[in-house]
Each structure stands twice: as structure tokens, then as C-alpha cells.
Image (tube, rainbow, N blue to C red):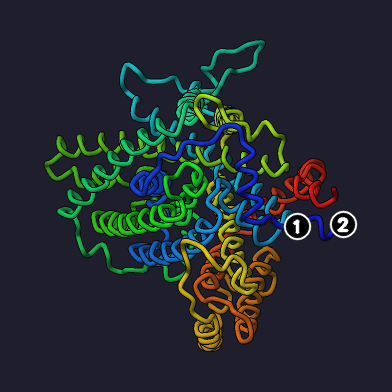
Amino acid sequence: MSFWNNIRRKKTIAHLASLQQQEATVMQRVLGVRDLTALGIAAIIGAGIFGTIGKASFDGGPAIIWLFIFTGITCGLSALSYARFAGIAPVSGSAYTYAYLSFGELLAWIIGWDLLLEYAIGNIAVAISWSDYFTGLLSGTFLEIPSWMSMDFLSAKRAFEAGLKGSEAYAAYLNAPRILGFPLIADVPALMIVVLITWLCYVGIHETRRAGNVMVLLKLAVIALVIICGVFFINTDNWIPFAPNGFSGVMTGVSAVFFSYIGFDAISTTAEECKNPQRDLPKGMFYSLLICTVLYILITLVLTGMVPYTELNVGDPLAHVFGHVGLNGTKGIIAVIKGIIAVSAIVAMASVLLVFQLGQPRIWMSMSRDGLLPRIFSRLHPKYHTPGFSTIVTGLLVAIPALFLNLTEVTDLTSIGTLFAFVLVNGGVIIMDMKNEHATGAFRIPYIPAWWGLFPLLITLGILSFIYPEQAAFSSGLQKGTHWLVLLPRMLLLATMVLLAIGSVNKRISLIPSLGLLSCLYLMAELSPLNWERFFIWLALGLVIYFLYGYRHSKIRKEKTT
């Protein structure tokens, strides 16, 4: 078989079933719709609602709710495609397995490698954020943690070299104990929370389910408290102007807002632990997305109504707004609310860690079953029925960098990685429909001819580009001298739209996955050139690993050459 055919080889449903049957130990099927919905909410509501929503509101004003709605619809369209695949391939592996079925091995490896950005690498940033909230809560008490035990080394060193004497980072570098002159500075709380969450994932899905459900109930109660209490302090004058920075200001928050939605797809990695994955996975994804979108809209309206949007560029916007209104004679009550918010933020971050630490080992397990990773990654623990080795490796991959590094740019990198996964899942459904593959399944996306929506969309964009030429390039413009990594994704988006519209004339292309694919490409096009550059470097590194190991050890390749 030629090299080109080798990297395009696909799996079949029968092949997936045979790989599962070869396992000596099987996973426990204990998750129902309620558990999956809770896991989805646990993953989605975290740093977004307790942190990045403030910066997004500062950039876009109250109109940022439209971006939340658009992003929620985008994720909903992608959720339909995930549900379609879950109906025909109810196995752990998520987008990796779906890409293997529709595109072939090379793109499956790329998406499996790419999902590291969403799950493991993204969790490094979550662990560091959790540590910041935790140490802030203990600050001023007898349990206060020294700065050199709650700070990453790079931030402390840079602050010391820059002479920032009043900063916490400078004090950490100055006061840290030393061995042979080298300061011992590490983010110990970040390490400890990752160890605790990894242990929960290691000892079984029962324990993970219970912990996730409790954490979700707690943070939903706190968010409801914030909304109900905040309504009484809303000043509608703060909503005028509604979009103070225009369309470009709203779109500045793309990365932060999309980061707020990341996680609903992670529950698809638990397919082999669901009681009825073909029925329950779609419901869990849709319910969690709907609940979280409504909560994001309400929280945004409350925050921007309580204080002017210009005051929301803070790391803890929920606590900040109550500190602002607390000047009106209700300091005692407000102090209690701020304390509850701080505790719930810690719980929310921990629940995000839980879901992503649960998802990454199952991706590796699926890749290992296919021979693209060593066999040990798919080995299940004989007592706990979890991918034990993969869970430990995931814990180390998150805990060690979180101990020493400051990855403030991980939010954007995680967003572009997740969007790319969504693009391929939507594209996979389009390919299946065109070839009429896997026509049966427990979940079917309603079929609407793509040309019904794509041609009117192209005509509308053409008219708007003529009337508003300064906005023709999707808010950033394609003026002379524009960076090629700004130009490339926009041209890719336009070319994809045209190809889908033309192809839909004589081929069976569905509108819903087409819109899901295009909306994800659009959000990717709004990310900065630096994110695209890092993304390409990450993918190039993954290709090197694939050709050094995965290509030669692929089980499908071996089966077809014997």
C-alpha cells in the first residue's frame, strides 16, 4: 500500500467494536443524562464566568451578550455533529475517533494531538488560576501561603530583574529559601490540586461522578445567588451605550468568550462509561450548553448593569461588582457574598480540572488501542476500571509545568485547538452525508439542503462588503501590509464557504454541519497571528511524533499489509 493510502486509511464501526472486545478489563457504565449534564456544566462554568467574562465585558460592553449567544449557537451546531458521531460510534475517543472514521489516520492523529491543547495543556492554566484564587482566599489569615510557595519561578525572576520592588513576584524572589544560591520558587497549591483531581480520576468513575455533581450544585447555587442579589443593584444607565466599542470591540473577546464554552465536548470521552451513550450523550451536551448560555447572558447583564463596563477589567469581576455596591451601607452582607463567590470560584476551577483530567486519558486510551501510542496507555486498572497509566501521565503533564511556569497565553492556544477539533467534527459529518456512510444511527441531524442558507449568506456578505468596505474583512480588515496569518484564515473561510455553496448544488451537503464548520472557522479567523503561529508549530511537532512512532505501529496498517 502506498504512503498516501496509508495515511488516509480509515476505521470502521466493526473495527471499533473489535478493539473494545479485545480488552481484558472493561469500563464501568454508570453515567446517565443527569451525570453527563453535570459534567458538561462542570467543564464549561469555570474560569470564564469567574474571570475572563470581566475582560470580555470591558472590551465589548453589554453587547458582549451577542457574542455569548453567537458562540453558544456555534457550539450547539458542533454539538449536533458530536451527537451524530456518538450515535454511530459510542466509544471513548471523542473527536479523534470521529476523525478516524471520516478523514483517515493522519487527520485523526492531528486531532488527537490537537486535543492535548484543550484538555492537558489547557488544564495547566486552570491549575494556575485555581492557585491564584486559593491563595487570595487565604491571604490575611493565619493560613496565608508565602509568596515563594504560590508563585511560578519565571514571573518572580522577571519581576526581580525588572526591579518591581512593590510586587508580590519581586518579594517572592527576594524572600525564597535558596540551595546553592538558587531560589526555591514553585506554585505548590497548583501542584496539590492537580494531584488531588488526578487521584479522583484514577480511583474510578463513581467517585468522579459524585464529586462532579456536588461541585456543580454548589456553583450553580452561587451563580443564582449572584444573579438574584445583583438584580437589585442594576442601574440601566450603565447599559447605554450598549455597544460602546462597536462590532470590533465585541469581537475582541472571541478567545475569552469561546474559552468560557470549552468543555461540553469533553463528556463525549466518557462514552464507554455511559449507560446508554447513543441516547444520553447528545442530551447531556445540549442540556449543559443551554443552561450555561442562559447563565452567561444573565451574569453579563447583571455585571454590566451593576457597574459601568469600564470598571470590569479585573480578574475577579463577580466579587468586584459587589465590592463596588457595598459602599452603600450593606458592607456586612456584601462581604459575606464576596466570600461565598471566592469559595465557589475555587470549586468551579476544580470541577473544570476534574472533567479535563477525566477526558485526556481516554483520548490517549483510544489512540493506544489503534497502535498510535504504546500499548500501556490503553491498559485499564484491574480494580478501578480506569486507564490508570494514562491518568498518571496526564497528571504529571499538568502538575509539573503548573508548578514552575506562567502560561498566560494558554487561553488563546486552547481556544484555537478546540475550534480546530470542532471544524473537523463538522467536516466529518458533511463527508459522511456526501458519501451516504453510516446512514443509520441513534441520532440524526435534520437534513436541510446547504444551498438554502449558503447562497443567501454569500449574497448578503457581498452586499455588506460593498456598503461597508471597511468591515469587509471581518472587523480586522485586509489592508495593505496585513500579516499573512491574518489574511490566510480569512481566505480559507471564504474559500470554504464558496466550495460548500457550489458543492451543495449537486451533492448531499447539510446546512447545519456546514454552518457549524463555517462559524468555527470564523471564530478561528478572529484570533491573533501569534496564536496561529504557535498552533502551526504545535501541529508540526505532532507530525514528527506520528511519523517516528504512530505511522509504523498503526494496527490498521499492520492488518492491511498482512
Callout 1 touching callout 2 (CB < 8 Å): yes
Return the residue nearer the eye: 63 or 324: 63
Residue type of the residue flagged with mark 1: Arg
Q: Is residue 150 visible?
A: no
Mark 1 or mark 2: which comes first in sequence?
2
Residue 179 at x, y = what percent? 63, 11
Q: Residue at x 47, y 47 (%)?
A: 267
Q: Is residue 29 visible?
A: yes
SS for tag 2?
A: loop
Residue 122 at x, y = what percent? 54, 43
Vertical relation: 123 (above or below) 143 = below
Please tell me how many numbered marks the rendered image carries: 2
Which residue corresponds to mark 2? 1
Vertical relation: 177 (above or below) 242 = above
Residue type of the residue flagged with mark 2: Met
Q: Residue at x 70, y 34 (%)?
A: 375
Residue 12 at x, y = what percent? 66, 56
405 sits left or right of 169 in the view: right
Q: CA distance from mark 1 to mark 2?
A: 10 Å
Which residue corresponds to mark 1? 9
The outermost residue toward the top is: 180
Return the residue nearer the eye: 21 or 296: 21
135 sits left or right of 492 in the view: left
Quadrant of the image containing the N terminus: bottom right
